[in-house]
Structures are given as C-alpha cells and as structure tokens.
Image (tube, helix red, strand yellow):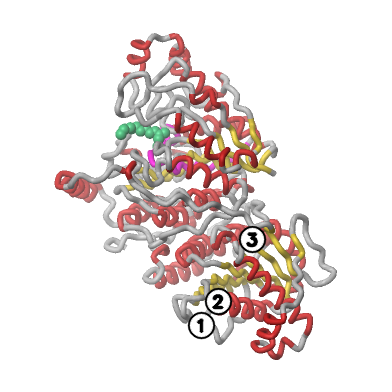
Amino acid sequence: MGTALIYDEEMTKYKLLWVDPACKIEVPERLTVSYEALKNSGLADRCVSVPVREATDEDILLVHSEEYLEAVKKTPYMTLEDLKEFTLQYGDVYFHPNIYHCAKLAAGASLQLVDSVMTGKVRNGMALVRPPGHHSMRSAASGFCVFNNVAIAAQYAKLKHGVKRVLIVDWDVHHGQGVQYSFEDDPGVLYFSWHRYEHQKFWPQLRESDYDNVGKEKGEGFNINVPWNKVGMKNSDYLSVFCHMLLPVAYEFNPDLVLVCAGFDSAIGDPEGEMCASPDIFAHLTHLLMNLAGGKVCAVLEGGYNLTSLPQSVCQTVHTLLGDPAPRPANLDGPCESALESLHCSRSAHRKYWSCLKHAAEHPSSDVSTKRLKLAEEEEKVENGEEKEKAEEEVWPEPPKRVTAPVRTALVLPDGVSCPDRCKLFSSSKDPVIVNKLRENFPRDAADSDALTTLSSLVALVEKMEKNEICNGLALVQDVSMAMTCVVQHAAIALSNRVLVVCVGDVLVPAHYKEDGTILLVHFSNKEEEQKSKYHIPVCLKKGCSDVSGFMQAVLGLLLPLGYEYDPSLVLLARTPDSGLCDGAWQQLTGLLQGLAQGHTLVLLQEGERAYVGPTASSLLGEAAPSVGKIKAPLLEDVESMEGLRTRLQVDWKLLQTTAPETG
Ligand code: Q9C
Ligand code: ZN
C-alpha cells in the first residue's frame, strides 16, 4: 500500500497583483519549489500520483455558505479594481481572476486524497495545494485562504465514507480559526492546533485561540489549542507537546482518519513563524501520527513561506509517509519555560474531558489578571528590545540524506519457523572472533551449540544494523534475558554507543550492567522494583501490561520522551511470554519506537511466542499498527505511580516535564 501525492501545476497560476506587504509572501514558487524537491529527491516517483479534481458546489457547501460561494464565483470576471475592493472586506488575503479555480482544485485535491485513503487505494498521502485553507470561514476568506480544504475534507469523510471520528492535527504556525469554528460543537472531529499567539498579539489576534477554548456543547473537550507565547520554539517544544498532550488524547479519541493541516511556517527560517524547529522534526511529527487510524493519514499543505525550509520540510514529511525511517532528531535539550507554561495550561484546561489527563496538574495562575500582567511585561520587552535579525536570514544545516538500508527487516528464527513475506531470513556463518568472545563471556551457554549460533547471529545482525546494511531485526530466542545481555554487552561495549533497552514482562535485568549511560533500561512489569539510577527505570503497572490504557499512557508519556532525549543508536526491545500485553498495544509500541535510532530496532521474543512473529514483523516493516480500540481510564493506582515516576525523573530528563518550573 502506497503513498498518494496530489499536485497540479494549475495551482501555481495565480498571484498577488498589487502591493500588499501582508500578502507578498504567499507566492506560486511555494508550490513549485516543493514539488521540484520531491521530484529531485526521487520521492515523487515513489508515490502514487493521484489527479486533482474541482470540488463541486455541494462539496464546498459542506463548510461554506451559499452567499459566500456565490460571491467568490464572481471573482473570475472582476476587474482589477473590483478584485481589490472585494479583497478589502477580508483580512490578509488577496483575490485573482484564477484563484476561484485554484481554490476549487485545492479543496478537490483534499477530497481526492481522502477518497484514495478511505477506499484503500493507498495507505496515506499528501496534497500540495494553493490556496491554503485553514483560516477561511463559513462566509469569509482570510489569511491567504479561500475555501477550508481540510474542514471540507473532514465533513466529506464523515458524509461519504461514514467516518465516525476525524482527528485534525494543525501543525501550521497560525491558528486555523476556520477549522475551529467549523467543528466547535462536533465531538466527531477533534481539532488540535498549536500556534504563535504571544498573548493575543500575533495574527489573527483572537481571544478564542487561547488554551481555554476547548469547544462547546457536545463538542466540549474536542478542541485543543496550544498557544505559543514566545517565538523561537524548538524541536523539544514540539515533541513535548506531542508526547504529553496530542498523542495521549489522540489515542484516547481513537480516530478513524487523521487529517493534517500541514503548514511548514512552524519550521526554522519562516518569516511568519519565527520558530526554530528543524525541517526533520516533521519526519517525527508524521511518524508519531502514523500508527493512529490504522495509518490513514492525509496531509494537506497550508502555510510555509521560506523557500528553502519549506521544500525540506515537505520532503521530510513525504519520506516518512512512504515508510522510510526518520533521521535521529537533533538538539533535544528539553522544552523552554514558555512552552511548558503553554503545555501546562492546555493540559489543565482539558483535564476534565480526557482520562489520560486526569492527573495533569491544575494551572494555578490561569486567571485573567495574571494574563494581563504578562501582556504588559511582554509589551515592555518589545519596547526595550533591540532590532533582531530577520528569520529568513537564519541558516541551518540541510537535513542529511535519508539512506534506506538495503534490507528492512531481518529475522533470526529457529528451524521450522517460517519467515513472513518481505522479511529476510538472517543466518550468519559463525564468525570465529564473535564466537570466541561469546565463549569468554558466556561459558555456560556457549556449551549449547544452538544457543551459540543464535547469539553469534544476533551480534552479526547488530553489526549490520550499525552499518545500515539492515534496518531492523527480530529474533526468536531460547532465553530473552540471556540474548539481551549478550547484545547489550556487544553493542554498548564493543561499539560504545547508546542502547535503549525496553523490556516488557519479567525479564531478568543483567546484574553486572553498567550505569554509565551507555544503556538506558525501561522495564514494564507488574513487579515493584527499585529505580537504581536515571538509566534504570522500572515502570510498574498493577495489572502488568494487560491494562492497555495504562500501558499506552506509559509509552506515550514516559518511554517516548525518555527515548527521544536519550537519542539511542540502537533500540533493543524484549518481551517475555508472561507479559500479558495484547497484540495491538505491542504493535503500537514497536511502531512508535521506530522513530528512534533511525529505525534500528532489534526485537527479541521467547521461542514460545511464535504467534507474535507475524504481527511484530509487520510493525517492523513499517505497516501501521491496528488501533487498540476504545481505551478506558487507566487504573488510578497506575496513574499515580507513573506520575510519581515522571516527577522524580524530570530533574534528569527534561522532556518529561509537563509544567513550568515556577508554577509546577
Ligand atoms: N506579516 C497561512 O499560513 N498575516 N496563512 C500576514 C504579514 C497573515 C497565514 C502578516 C498570515 C496568514 C495559511
Ligand atoms: Zn500558517
């Protein structure tokens, strides 16, 4: 199952015809440079090219009023003077004789994308469109947007494909107020947006873009705003909000379809956003959404005005949609204080709607007077502020080429266990150097020739992963604990790299294991265990991993942020038969962890767990994990113990923070 790419040159055929500083950044080249970059990198050829179509009146009326549609319909026949005047009734937008045609194509492209994904023609996809959509409202154009492409697509998916729950993730740097207004009272559409806000001083300067706008009536709790009150937000700030706000709620919501308002003005260099996230962060944002809704992710271009950063970000997104492992994220030094403040406020505002946030700290100072004070403080700073350099002049390294390993998934299996499709059976001729080393380290087990063969294969496999000849692997072994010890020793000591070890169930933690940071061990079980250091983290769940909601909460709120901050070069994932973890949650775990270490994951399963080979291999191949279904509230005890663990660890692991220092 492939990735759709929808693009038509026709959408480059309108532009600003007069002088307007607010609109001069919205240029046709935005689309041409993005598409060229996809072609030059070979990504476009790997996608399924789907033609655009014009949205019909009926489609457009799903979101917009008849009066507005009729008014826009007249614009192709207007004179320049008429167009200017027509434009004046709206904010930060321009009209052109061909924009109505393009707006129909932009909305139609989004619908073609939804059709392709919902009918199973492709797994996911991206539509490169102009004009963008998320600012346009029922009866108004706004912020370069004419028709609300994504809002129309969401309504269409519900109506034409019977989709019950749609998640809209708006990672554009502006607030998509048009999307918010469209679904404010609709519990079937969960809208998430982060946006430059600066205490309401940044366009569109709406009170209702703040964190306390949570939706209304039946839709209460289904609108999530994370306002950025400072510029310069970085990768850590974005990942932190994904791990601690969006993802837990998204998994609880359990969408049937994910739409992304994919604006790239939230990346470094953008003159509008003035943020500092690197283009490769979009690989991770995309990856983290790809195990929701069975992988049905439709990304539709919104903003993005730096003609260097925009195509880089678009390529990162499409690369990931195609299933290529994400690059290791750089500079994850923890979220800034202002981001934590925003996160804290949003989590607090949503506590009463989502059981995953029930334990979130209340925000003590979210009343109006405090906000006024902050507003005044900011104003002062602006007045005293010296001239800062332009965002467009910012320089950053080009994201490194994403080289795909020739083998995606290699399997080490005992005789008689068949190898799943698209995987490669791995058998190493016993390397005498490896064998000797194993004999030294494991004299007892080395007596067993089968065990020795398996262990030497594992070591050889890890070496091939290090060289990127193999992306990931899976082994059925006699003794998970032993195999784990062996691989850890080899990988961490011989190759002196960081290894993230994730254990599910009762695995014996190697006694002689060093606490020097070469290994980070996260162990999920139902046994109370002492936390020995910042590198040895037992996560105890009352009912073990059989409680899916508790387990997913721990994965999203503890394991992912730890993993991202640790930035391993290898992930070792081990599971024992007694773990109690269901298929779905296991596949989610396996899928999500591939965002780390460039996808270099080695999974160890006990020999008896043959039934798990297929599902595990499918996750390692990059197929979307099935949804874990409607998850209920986790056990209060577990929530409390996890929160205790998170609080203790946040001193050492900054990505675990969920509150700003002075208020938390
Ligand atoms: N400094 C989208 O990104 N304000 N629209 C421009 C110029 C309007 C952005 C002010 C920004 C609209 C889709
Ligand atoms: Zn934008």
Residue lying at 38% horizontally and 39% vertically, measured from the top left: 174
Q: Residues within 10 Å of mark 3 (few under 14, many from 20)?
A: many
- Disc 1 C-beta below 8 A from ligand 2: no
User: Would residue 518 be seen by someone viewing this image from the given angle?
Assistant: yes
Residue to which mark 1 is pinned: 514
User: Would residue 549 be seen by someone viewing this image from the given angle?
Assistant: no
Question: Residue 556 placed where, x, y %?
Answer: 51, 60
Spatial CA span between label 2 and label 1:
10 Å
Q: Nearer the viewer, mark 1 or mark 3?
A: 3
Residue to which mark 3 is pinned: 471
Q: Do the residues under discs 2 and 1 have CB atoms within 8 angstroms?
A: yes
Vertical placement of 566 versus 480: above or below? above
Please report the bounds of the magenta region as a residue range.
163-180
Q: Secondary structure at mark 3?
A: strand
Vertical placement of 348 versus 128: above or below? below
Question: Residue 551 placed where, x, y %?
Answer: 56, 64
- The three-letter code of the residue at mark 3 reads Cys
Q: Secondary structure at mark 2?
A: helix
The question of residue 169 being in magenta is answered with: yes
Q: Residue furthest right?
A: 416
Residue to which mark 2 is pinned: 492
Vertical placement of 358 versus 229: above or below? below
